[in-house]
Amino acid sequence: KEVIPPLEQLMVEKEGYLQKAKIADGGKKIRKNWSSSWIVLSSRKLEFYKESKQQALSNAKSGHKPESVDLCGAHIEWAKEKSSRKNVFQITTVSGNEFLLQSDIDFIILDWFHAIKNAIDRLPRD
Ligand code: I3S
């Protein structure tokens, strides 16, 4: 059966490539492993695709789901001490998942930080 997503979830606010490393899952630390990810921000969530956008779109048609991050109640902060890389920030979800996001290009990471922070600040905390 077909599930129709709420309109807000269809509204993409920002998308692009960043370096991503998941460092905790459900509050449990996991080994850091940086990789390039196609990231899509909509009002309530971030989605991480391993593939290119083209590949992601064709996979989506075949029912393949990206890793999805609920931004309700999430925290975002700069995380200089979590990596030797420059321009790293961390997102922590209510469920205890922690992600580092990074770009070498200053304006790109700043745009992302503010876009995600604004999205979080607009959402209810629970
Ligand atoms: O915080 P860490 O453990 O120094 O992070 C580095 C490791 O994840 C490393 O992989 P190994 O665990 O296989 O050694 C990565 O290759 C490095 O990129 C990580 O450090 P940076 O400073 O790049 O986040």
Image: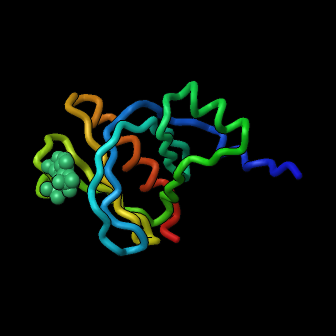
Percent of width and height locating residue 3: 81, 51
Nearer-the-camera pick, 2 or 63 = 63
Residue 95 shows up from this direction: yes
Asked which colour scheme the image uses, the reply is: rainbow
Nearer-the-camera pick, 24 or 111 = 24
Q: Is residue 41 above or below residue 108?
A: below
Say which quarter of the image contains residue 98: bottom left
Q: In this view, does 19 lie above or below 53?
A: below
Instruction: Report the label total.
Output: 0
Percent of width and height locating residue 90: 29, 55
Q: Quick one: which residue is furthest to the bottom in this view?
A: 27
**Residue pictured at 33% horizontal, 41% vertical:** 35
Percent of width and height locating residue 118: 41, 47
Left or right of 4? Residue 65 is left
**Residue pictured at 66% horizontal, 30% vertical:** 58
Residue 79 shows up from this direction: no
Q: Quick one: which residue is furthest to the top in this view?
A: 54
**Residue pictured at 48% horizontal, 57% vertical:** 71
Left or right of 81? Residue 12 is right
Nearer-the-camera pick, 35 or 41 = 35
**Residue pictured at 13% horizontal, 52% vertical:** 80
Percent of width and height locating residue 113: 32, 43
